[in-house]
Image (cartoon, helix red, strand yellow):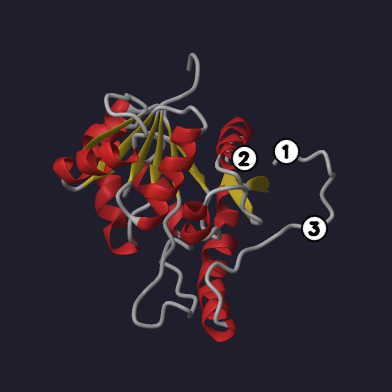
């Protein structure tokens, strides 16, 4: 990829997707919002652009956004996860696909319930069957905190089966104002996905909005 890669955020009109998209656009990344409705995505992109006529943020349907990007971030509800992965499979060959989906099952979303594959990320890897470089990240960071602006006192665990891919996603986490931490292979994504349900329960019991995680003991030279 020459220059900064174009990032497609599928579910880019939702809370987490729009928050990440805003931060990456502010950091200078070309961003394409994806939605089931192209018109909805275009309207959200127009609102997001600080200057009318800017090409920093565009809007497409999910398939069009994935086709237009170098990196594809999936930030859709779990109920839509499998359908979205199957839809984009033809256009993500060789691309990094970052799965930010958490397998939350209403009504008890504060109770851990993992899918048959073990995690949403492993489901994506199975469905894509090697067509894309599947990574997993952004499960435990609050959308509300991302929308608030400024740095976020939260670490983002990044998982994937190739070290170079993890490094690229860690850079995206840092660009979003969080701290990316290498969590190892994709199979480890189960830990972060399960932890999201735990954090939802903590938010409710302690009446807070946006409990997150910090990994202690890392070198102070770790990028922010």
* Secondary structure of the residue carrying numbered label 2: helix
* Image vertical order of residue 56 relative to residue 216, above or below: above
Residue 15 figure quarter: bottom left
Q: Which mark is residue 216?
A: 3
Q: Earlier in the sequence, mark 1 or mark 2?
A: 2
Q: Is residue 184 left or right of residue 39?
A: right
Q: Is residue 84 left or right of residue 155?
A: left
- Distance Cα–Cα, label 1 vs label 2: 7 Å
Disc 1, disc 2: CB below 8 Å? yes
Direction bottom: furthest residue: 205
Q: Residue at x 27, y 49 (%)?
A: 84
Q: Residue at x 42, y 46 (%)?
A: 125
- Which of labels 3 and 2 is toward the front? 2
Residue 153 figure quarter: bottom right
* Secondary structure of the residue carrying numbered label 1: loop
Q: Position of residue 123 (x, y in %)?
A: 40, 54
Disc 3, disc 2: CB below 8 Å? no
Residue picked out by circle 1:
223
Q: Residue at x 35, y 28 (%)?
A: 69
Which quarter of the rendered picture does the C terminus lie within? top right
- Distance Cα–Cα, label 3 vs label 2: 17 Å
- Distance Cα–Cα, label 3 vs label 1: 14 Å
| Any part of residue 94 in sight | no
Q: Position of residue 16 (x, y in %)?
A: 42, 54
Q: Is 34 in front, or is 188?
A: 34
Residue picked out by circle 2:
174
Q: Which mark is residue 54?
A: none
Mark 2 Cα within 10 Å, few/some/many (few <14, many 20+)?
some
Q: Is 25 in front, or is 78?
A: 25
């Amino acid at each position: 990829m020459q220059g900064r890669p174009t990032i497609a955020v599928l579910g880019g009109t939702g809370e987490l997707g729009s928050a990440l998209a805003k931060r990456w656009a502010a950091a200078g990344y070309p961003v394409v919002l994806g939605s089931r409705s192209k018109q909805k995505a275009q309207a959200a992109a127009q609102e997001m652009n600080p200057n009318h006529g800017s090409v920093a943020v565009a809007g497409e349907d999910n398939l069009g956004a994935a086709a237009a990007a170098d990196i594809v971030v999936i930030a859709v509800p779990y109920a839509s996860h499998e359908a979205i992965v199957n839809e984009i499979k033809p256009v993500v060959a060789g691309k990094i696909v970052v799965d930010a989906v958490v397998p939350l099952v209403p009504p008890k979303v504060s109770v851990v319930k993992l899918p048959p594959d073990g995690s949403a990320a492993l489901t994506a890897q199975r469905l894509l069957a090697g067509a894309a470089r599947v990574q997993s990240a952004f499960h435990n960071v609050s959308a509300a905190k991302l929308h608030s602006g400024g740095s976020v006192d939260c670490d983002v665990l990044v998982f994937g089966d190739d070290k170079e891919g993890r490094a690229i996603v860690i850079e995206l986490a840092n660009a979003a104002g969080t701290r990316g931490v290498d969590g190892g292979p994709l199979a480890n994504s189960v830990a972060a996905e399960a932890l999201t349900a735990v954090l939802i329960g903590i938010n409710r019991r302690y009446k807070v909005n946006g409990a997150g995680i910090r990994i202690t003991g890392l070198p102070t030279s770790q990028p922010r």
